[in-house]
Image: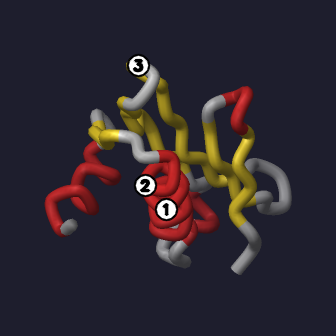
Amino acid sequence: MSDVIHLNEEQRFIVELSGDPAVLEYKMLSHNHIDFTHTFVPFRARGKGYAEALVEAGFSWAKQQGYDIQASCWYVDKFLKDA
């Protein structure tokens, strides 16, 4: 599994794949509230755990920052319900 990279200024996490990256995007709603808005994994790379790795990295970072987390992305929302 490739490493997850946080692109803070672009408000997203990525996993570099040959060609298109897998992506988790977020939006800061306030100084302590974050919304994970979108995940995308290229078709040929689906089912290999990239989206889950992105969400785990995003949640870990957000919790370290002390952010309140919400998810308008259905995939990320599944993880919030399980937490």
Q: Position of residue 59 (x, y in %)?
A: 44, 57
Mark 1 neighbour class, 10 Å CA radius: few under 14, some 14 to 19, many 20 or more: few
Depicted 17 relative to depicted 11: above or below: below
Q: Position of residue 2 (x, y in %)?
A: 75, 73
* Residue for point 69% across, 62% down: 4
- Give the residue type that dot 2 points to: Lys
C-alpha separation, residue under disc 1 versus residue under disc 2: 5 Å
- Give the residue type that dot 3 points to: Ser
Q: Dot 2 lies on which element?
A: helix
* Residue for point 60% across, 47% down: 23
Residue that numbered label 3 is attached to: 30
Quadrant of residue 80 within the rendered picture: bottom left
Mark 1 and mark 3 residues within 8 Å of each other at the beta carbon: no
Depicted 15 relative to depicted 38: above or below: below
C-alpha separation, residue under disc 3 versus residue under disc 2: 15 Å
Quadrant of residue 82 within the rendered picture: bottom left
Q: Dot 3 lies on which element?
A: strand
Mark 2 neighbour class, 10 Å CA radius: few under 14, some 14 to 19, many 20 or more: few
Q: Position of residue 36 (x, y in %)?
A: 41, 39
Mark 1 and mark 2 residues within 8 Å of each other at the beta carbon: yes
Residue toward you, 9 or 68: 68
Question: Which label's residue is closer to the chain start, 1 or 3?
Answer: 3
- Position of the C terminus, as image quadrant, is bottom left
Q: Is residue 73 left or right of residue 61?
A: left
Q: Dot 1 lies on which element?
A: helix
C-alpha separation, residue under disc 1 versus residue under disc 3: 18 Å
Q: Is residue 66 left or right of residue 58?
A: left
Looking at the image, which residue sits at the far right? Answer: 18
Residue that numbered label 1 is attached to: 60
